[in-house]
Amino acid sequence: MKDDCIFCRIANGEIPAKTLYEDDKFRVILDQGPATKGHALIIPKEHYADLYELPEELAGEVMKLAKRMVIRMTEKLGCKGFNLVQNNGDLAGQTVFHFHMHMIPRYQADGQKIGWKPQEAAPEELEQTRAQIVD
Ligand code: AMP
Ligand code: ZN
């Protein structure tokens, strides 16, 4: 645990938060600045800055927990869809440098837009990128 890390302190119960779920490895809380009603964060209790640091096994558990939470929140909140968002690095919009997964319920006309602007990519460029990653 990092003393100067807000999510370490929340996950370990030192700072209060609106907890939706807790076990020995994770705490799930409501985001204090929600994109929509029910916007929640999965926070591991151990400190890992981002996905690069998160152990593979824990990464798998995050997704299993996300699935369970999404099903429950959909039943309880009556939302019509969900976005899972997970930012790594300040360039990618990360502001709290303790790994977390956003779960954002979506409602008809909720006024939110989570996405990107698709760019043109020629087949040769896609092939060059594929080769760069795979080879
Ligand atoms: P990110 O930009 O992916 O690092 O997301 C950080 C998120 O943490 C933001 O959506 C904030 O609203 C949220 N957040 C920051 N501090 C708190 C807090 N004390 N309690 C609940 N959510 C928080
Ligand atoms: Zn931390």
Image (cartoon, rainbow, N blue to C red):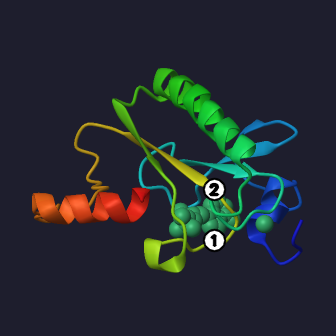
Residue shown at 53% from the left, 29% from the top: 73
Residue 46 seen:
yes
Could you say which is closer to the camera, residue 95 or residue 135? 135
Q: Circle 1 sits on which residue?
A: 96
Disc assigned to residue 100 = 2
Could you say which is closer to the camera, residue 52 or residue 83? 52
Does residue 26 sit above or below 91 in this rendering? above
Residue contact between numbered discs 1 and 2, judged by CB atoms under 8 Å? yes
Q: Is mark 2 within 8 Å of ligand 1?
A: yes
Residue 92, image x, y percentages: 45, 72
Q: Is mark 1 within 8 Å of ligand 1?
A: yes
Residue shown at 75% from the left, 63% from the top: 48
Could you say which is closer to the camera, residue 94 or residue 59? 59
Image position of 19 (left or right of 125)? right
Residue shown at 65% from the left, 64% from the top: 50
Does residue 94 sit above or below 60 in this rendering? below
> Pointer 2: residues within 10 angstroms few (<14), some, or many (20+)?
many
